[in-house]
Image (cartoon, grey):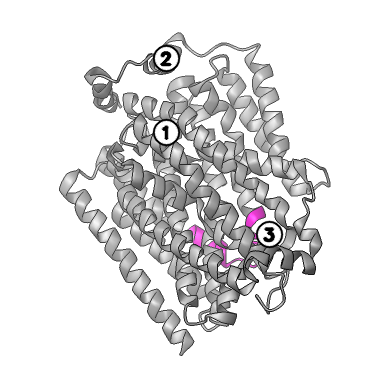
Amino acid sequence: MDNLMTMTILGAFTLAFLLVSYLSKRGEAQQSSSSIEDFVIGGRNTGALVLMLSMGATYFSTWTLLGSFGAYFREGVWFVGFAVWTIFHGVFVWLFGTRIWLAGKRFGFATPGQMIEHYYCSKRLRITVAVIGIIALVPVMLIQVAGGARALETLTNGAIPYVVGVTLASTLVGVIVLWTGFKGTAWTDAFMGIFFATILVFTALYVIHLAGGLALFANVASVQPELMVNSGKPWKMLELWLGLGFGAWVLPHMWQKFYSAQSPEVLGKVAMATPFWNSWMMAIIPLIVGTAAVIPGIVPTLTSANSDTILPQLYAAHLPGLGAFVVAGILAAAISTINSQLLSSASLVTEDILVHLRNEPLEDRHLTRATRIVVALLTIIVFVLAMLPGASGFLVPVASLGFGLGLQLVPSALGALHLRHITEAGAFSGLLVGTLTMAILAILKLDIPVGPALCGFVVNVLVTSLVSCFTQAVPRKSIQDFHGLFDEYLKGRELDQTDIAGLNTARAEK
């Protein structure tokens, strides 16, 4: 009976999900054409509320609804410090996102690589940024599918096996992205963000009730007092801050969300709202539920090995009738993250790699068609990877690999946005050496206090700075195109029609 209810609720959730996608698709058909710009970045007219919800839902992945709960259970309150990144992220949206929007609007960019190539006049850097961006998104996409499937299997005691969950998540993501493009993913992100936020608030209140109300943390301390003590780990925390706060904004799917905004003012509103939306969802609620889970009777079947499935185990033990809503929420979190990443990865393949393998440029409709084909292929690849034994591991460490790779893209991006002294040779050398350093350390798994991502980033910055001191600066025109535009905007000059017309001019010149 419980499993029948679970499948019924999941079916209703799927129908609601498809309905929201259909409505967004119908609105898109009435308002815009089916150009690659519409498909990949929504025609650059996303408003503040939808963008904020979409951006937040992209972060609220299985990393949040499963991995962070398990991390608190295993490691205690010290992990709450990672929430500092949510404040950093809001600042970075304003510092970097507005400049990305300005350059994107002026020159018609739809991918990070296009902006990087224009500034550095470097095809090799564009392709390298695209390849590393795609590789960075793969582990993050992987844990979405795997995490949602594991949660479904746990709640139903294996009645809905892992392979069915993987198939369901992969199919929904592939269909929605192929069907609706950016606008559909943004609206479904907003819907799903509100959906699982409601579930999390209810869960936190219920667990507080089970764990003794205001005496919750005292009760946790009586069982495992070490969890209530800050265990330090400053280097690990610094790596989390940098990876999530400083590395996440430069990942391709987030970069393209900046392009999609209606105006810089929209990004300013998102920057102010993001820390409040992210912090309580990603820190306070997981802290309450994850630490309370050590109290006997809260989650009877919980062990360190299966701690990434606290939520479904909690509902299976106490509220099995409502557990399906939790699994639907976890699937919503997974899909709302992977759909943006899948669309972004596909656009990188077509715009930044496929275009350079051809002697002739592709027409807009052909680019859109090619992007849809790549979406289908990447969906199949993620499905296959999710089926490999042990593919997901613990969700937080696997996700950290992706954010760590994103961190390697930061120096080259900062050259175009803020640091005029960075040269093409410096950016390219730093990116290669930093990524290689991170990869080697991750493979060797050396017992060192500083993690692979942070080591790679430090090496990246040093190499970028050193090589830039002895190599040719970027062309003067690039400085004027980018930093001149930024300076004019900061002086208070609003974009005029000439600036806006630059979008059409740039696309016509392609």
Q: Nearer the viewer, residue 453 or 418?
A: 418
Q: Nearer the viewer, mark 1 or mark 3?
A: 3
- State the residue position of label 3: 72
Looking at the rendered structure, the secondary structure element under dot 2 is helix
In terms of sequence position, does the residue under pointer 1 or pointer 3 come before the other? 3
- State the residue position of label 1: 356
Give the CA separation, mark 1 to mark 3.
Answer: 46 Å
Q: Which residues are magenta?
A: 381-397
- Is-magenta flag for residue 396? yes
What amino acid type is highlighted by mark number 2?
Asp
Looking at the rendered structure, the secondary structure element under dot 3 is helix
- State the residue position of label 2: 487
Outermost residue, bottom direction? 1
In terms of sequence position, does the residue under pointer 3 or pointer 2 come before the other? 3
Q: Nearer the viewer, residue 356 or 319?
A: 319
Residue 224's x, y, as percent?
79, 66
Outermost residue, front direction? 214
